Image: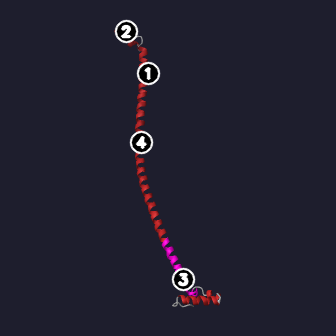
Amino acid sequence: MSVSDFIDRQTTGDLDLYDDILEEDFACEKESLAELQQKYQEALQKIATLENTVKERTAAMELLEKKNVYLQKNISMLYKTACTEIKRKNDNIESLREQLESYEKENYLKKRQSGYSKWNGDYQSNSKPSQTYRRNSYEKEKSPHMYSF
């Protein structure tokens, strides 16, 4: 407190012994209040920044969730398509195997009926004459319309 303030208070009869202490406390509290207000403003700014970050991350997460669902649907469809294609290919392979087996049976029967003469000229020449004769006579009896070579 200044001297002029002291004189003014004495003349008005408003002199208090603890005024100096109270003024010092008030000044300290005023400084503390200013610091707290500054910290409060900084905290509000940080909260606003964090809220913006949360909004951005939430939007990004929603976008990623949509992409995830989309990709899951795509992979599911690809899997189903692949399974269908594999089944189709397996069926095709099975059909080709059956055709091959049928063709091999036909060729086997043709070879057997003709005594291998068309496909293996050495068969009859290497076998014993009695076996060839028996085989040829058997085939003639079995199917008279077939010619044996």
- Indicate the colouring scheme: secondary structure
Q: Which residue is mark 4?
A: 54
Q: Amino acid at mark 4?
A: Val
Q: Amino acid at mark 1?
A: Cys
Along the line of sight, which residue is nearer the eye, 23 or 98?
Answer: 98
Q: Find the magenta span and give its range.
A: 93-118
Whichever of labels 2 and 3 marks the residue nearer the N terminus, that label is: 2
The mark closer to the camera, 3 or 4, is: 3
Residue 130 lies, in percent from the top left, at 64, 90
The mark closer to the camera, 2 or 4, is: 4
Q: Which residue is mark 1?
A: 28
Whether residues under marks 2 and 1 lie with C-beta atoms below 8 angstroms apart, the answer is: no
The CA distance from mark 1 to mark 4 is 38 Å
The CA distance from mark 2 to mark 3 is 142 Å
Q: Quadrant of the N terminus?
A: top left
15 on left or right of 125: left
Q: Which residue is mark 2?
A: 10
Whichever of labels 3 and 4 marks the residue nearer the N terminus, that label is: 4
Task: Tell me the SS state at disc 3.
Answer: helix
Residue 146 lies, in percent from the top left, at 52, 89
Residue, x 53% and y 79% (percent of image)?
A: 105
Task: Tell me the SS state at disc 1.
Answer: helix
Q: Which residue is mark 3?
A: 109
Residue, x 47% and y 69% (percent of image)?
A: 91
Residue, x 46% and y 68% (percent of image)?
A: 88
The CA distance from mark 2 to mark 1 is 26 Å
Whether residues under marks 3 and 1 lie with C-beta atoms below 8 angstroms apart, the answer is: no
Q: How many neighbours does mark 4 have within 10 angstroms: few (below 14), some (14-19), or many (20 or more)?
A: few
Task: Tell me the SS state at disc 2.
Answer: helix
The CA distance from mark 3 to mark 4 is 80 Å
- What is the magenta segment's predominant secondary structure? helix
